[in-house]
Amino acid sequence: MKEIDLYSEAKPRYYQLIPNREDGLILLALYQKYQKQEFTEDQIIQIINKVLSDLRGTNIRDEGNRNNNIILRLQEFFLWRDRKRKVYGFKNYGEEFCQKVFTRLSESYHPAKIERLFKNLLDTLKTSLEKNPPEVLFWMSDHFNSRSTELAQQIEILDQQVSESVDDFRFQIKQPQANILQVIETISTGLDHIKKHVHELTTGFQITYDIDDIVQDMLKNAANFELLDSINHVLKYNENVRNHLDQVSTRIDKIKPRIREFIFEFNQRELDRKTDDFLHYLLDNATYVRENNQPKRLIFPEEIESFSIRIPESVPRFYILTERDFARKAPLPPAVRSIDVEQTKEMMAKNIEKLEIKKRIQYWATEALNQIDKEGKLNFSPFFFNILNHEQHNLNIAVRTAQRLVKQCNSWQYEITVDQNEYHDPNYQNLSLWNMTILKKT
């Protein structure tokens, strides 16, 4: 593909590439009715009249110049015309335009599908690495690139659902409602439902960490340096989709306090209104009497019980300021920092140790998942002690492997059952576990 100045090339043809509202809706109405079928000019004019009548709210008589101009504009990029047979059809660009609009409006989130696609990416990546030479570039073009757009689109759909909930909230609170709090509660429940969708997608995106671990390990082999750009592309993509998902979740977390604040303000205004009505009622219905040259005594209406008002004494408070409170503080000398070489070496050693522990955790988690996929279940308690035996009694690796497995298996594909009868291993007398079993659903 040759390099072009996109702005300069698109500027004179923008309205042919991106139709205005009326032309775009006419195009979508044609696609809705005919799609890949051919249609005549009279049928196009019928659609034009119907759409413009709907948009403008009146019946518009047939105007030849107007219809011809619209048809000519649409022929630029969207419609073919067969001059011999005098019929029209959609160009590829027109089909893509209408199909993208249809997909965006009709597509919905599928957490199970997302998890399945990521699992497929992980499995195909492992298969490509087993070949000699590795077929990572083929995996990128055949699997990763073709799935990345579909995966990212799911997050955009969730974000769109949040925007629609906010727009619905703004619309509903402007309408005369018998119970505005009920409307707010309904919208808040809808946001909770979307937040649940985010959690389900987050579970599916956990597999991206496994893909990251694999491609990062490839950099240890100098022969894979030629794949650096491809590896970096995969890592960046995985990081971006996780960040975008976090942004949707954060956006929901910011919206819900706003709704609670609105409820508080609404209740406060309602309280002020009732207080104002009450005071006006007192002014209109209260009376006073004066007996034996005594001060006037206020008498409330019969519906209001008498009560006494006590005015607390006002006690003055004094704050004593000293000259020290007004004196300037001497500037602090700049801190002199030095590099502790021994401490730096120690930190590097700890980081290397942490990396090795992470690799062992990944190894045992993969072993467990493979056993579940192969046998349909995993008795985790003996598996836990097996990890201890092979990892020189390192309890940290065994516990973190258990945590990772519980997190990865917390989805619709697996079921975790716990029996509170303790499991003991003769080699570890002071350690016991509840019997935990991970099942793969069929």
Image (tube, rainbow, N blue to C red):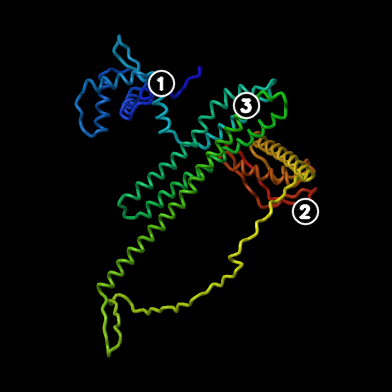
x and y, in percent, of residue 152 in the image: 51, 33
x and y, in percent, of residue 145 in the image: 55, 26
* Label 3 packing within 10 angstroms: few (<14), some (14-19), many (20+): few
Image disc number at residue 63 = none
- Along the viewing direction, whichever of 363 and 358 lies nearer the viewer: 358
Image disc number at residue 430 = 2
* Label 1 packing within 10 angstroms: few (<14), some (14-19), many (20+): few
Q: Amino acid at mark 3?
A: Asp
Q: Which part of the image, by quadrant, shows the C terminus? A: top right
Residue in the image at 40% along x and 25% along y: 97
Q: Give the answer, above or below, for where 377 lies relative to 291.
A: above
Q: Secondary structure at mark 2?
A: strand
Q: Are marks 3 and 2 in contact (CB under 8 Å)?
A: no
Q: Secondary structure at mark 3?
A: helix
The CA span between labels 1 and 2 is 70 Å
Residue in the image at 72% along x and 48% along y: 337
From this viewpoint, which residue is outermost toward the left?
61
Q: Amino acid at mark 2?
A: Asn
For mark 1, what is the residue? 93
In the displayed structure, does residue 284 sit left or right of residue 390? Answer: left
From this viewpoint, which residue is outermost toward the top?
84
Residue in the image at 47% along x and 22% along y: 5
For mark 3, what is the residue? 229
- Along the viewing direction, whichever of 236 and 202 lies nearer the viewer: 236
- Along the viewing direction, whichever of 385 and 138 lies nearer the viewer: 138
Which tag, 3 or 1, sits closer to the chain's start? 1
Q: Secondary structure at mark 1?
A: helix
